[in-house]
Amino acid sequence: MELRILKETPDYLAVYKPAGLAAETRNIREMDLVHALLKYLGGEGGRRPYLAMIHRLDQPVEGIVLFAKNKKAAADLSEQLQKQQMEKLYLAAVSCRTNEGKAQVQEALNEELCLTDYISFDRKRNVSEIVDAKKEGAQEARLRYTCLGYREAEQEALVQVHLLSGRHHQIRLQLSHAGMPILGDRKYGGGSICRFPALCAAGLSFRDPRNGELVSLRIEPENSVFRKWNLKNAVAD
């Protein structure tokens, strides 16, 4: 497969993951991003190169994924992630056909809003759901979002999300629960307007583990649903 390398240094590697490609899989017959990168990096004397995934993306979701190329960088970048010093920015095209959804996007046109829920993951069904905070195993999920554009006639909006925690299917579930299901997300009520959910990890900012300089990466989504929107400001630094 053809890799789209966004930035590479001796310490880390940032790459674009297409929608539909697994970040990592146990199926040896199925190509995934990790094995594609291991092949790209090669190795000396038949030894497997060091490669540690810092954060993951769901298989249907496209966007930026960050890897460390040595243990020291992996520890530094992982610490940034855990301490919320790494900013992850997503773009989502959502449906807002309910009164709740319309009210959410219209309010978010004027200010950044926050969603806080508690999520439970059902491993057997591979779905998450919003639950009471007191339920056993419930995990707090937080994100901030703004509305970058609203098409009233089509009842659709372009939403920018800053992820504050990393729960299973978090953005997809929380936006849907707030009346804004992501277009194409069959699992959480977004219908089948496109093959994959219109969700993209479009921005990533972190500190270089070697010199502490700020690294800011931005991409535009490949999903055709986004083409109706002006994304220049959405993906600008």
Image (cartoon, rainbow, N blue to C red):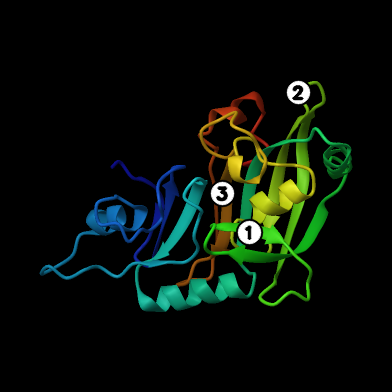
Q: Position of residue 218 (x, y in %)?
A: 55, 46
Name which residue lies at 51% across and 47% down: 63
Q: Which amino acid is tagged 2?
A: Glu
Q: Position of residue 201 (x, y in %)?
A: 56, 49
Tell me the CA gap for discs 1 and 3.
20 Å
Q: Nearer the viewer, residue 114 or 68?
A: 114
Q: Position of residue 41 (x, y in %)?
A: 25, 58
Q: Which residue is mark 1?
A: 128
Secondary structure of the residue carrying numbered label 3: strand
Secondary structure of the residue carrying numbered label 2: loop
State whether residue 215 is above or below residue 135: above
Query: Is the C-beta separation of discs 1 and 2 under 8 Å?
Result: no
Name which residue lies at 10% across and 69% down: 45
Q: Nearer the viewer, mark 1 or mark 3?
A: 1
Tell me the CA gap for discs 3 and 2.
24 Å
The first of marks 1 and 2 along the sequence is 1
Q: Which residue is mark 2?
A: 154
Q: Which residue is mark 3?
A: 201
Name which residue lies at 25% across and 57% down: 28
The first of marks 1 and 3 along the sequence is 1
Tell me the CA gap for discs 1 and 2.
28 Å
Task: Check disc 2: other Cα within 10 Å, few if <14, some if 14-19, many if 20+.
Answer: few
Q: Is residue 187 left or right of residue 61?
A: right
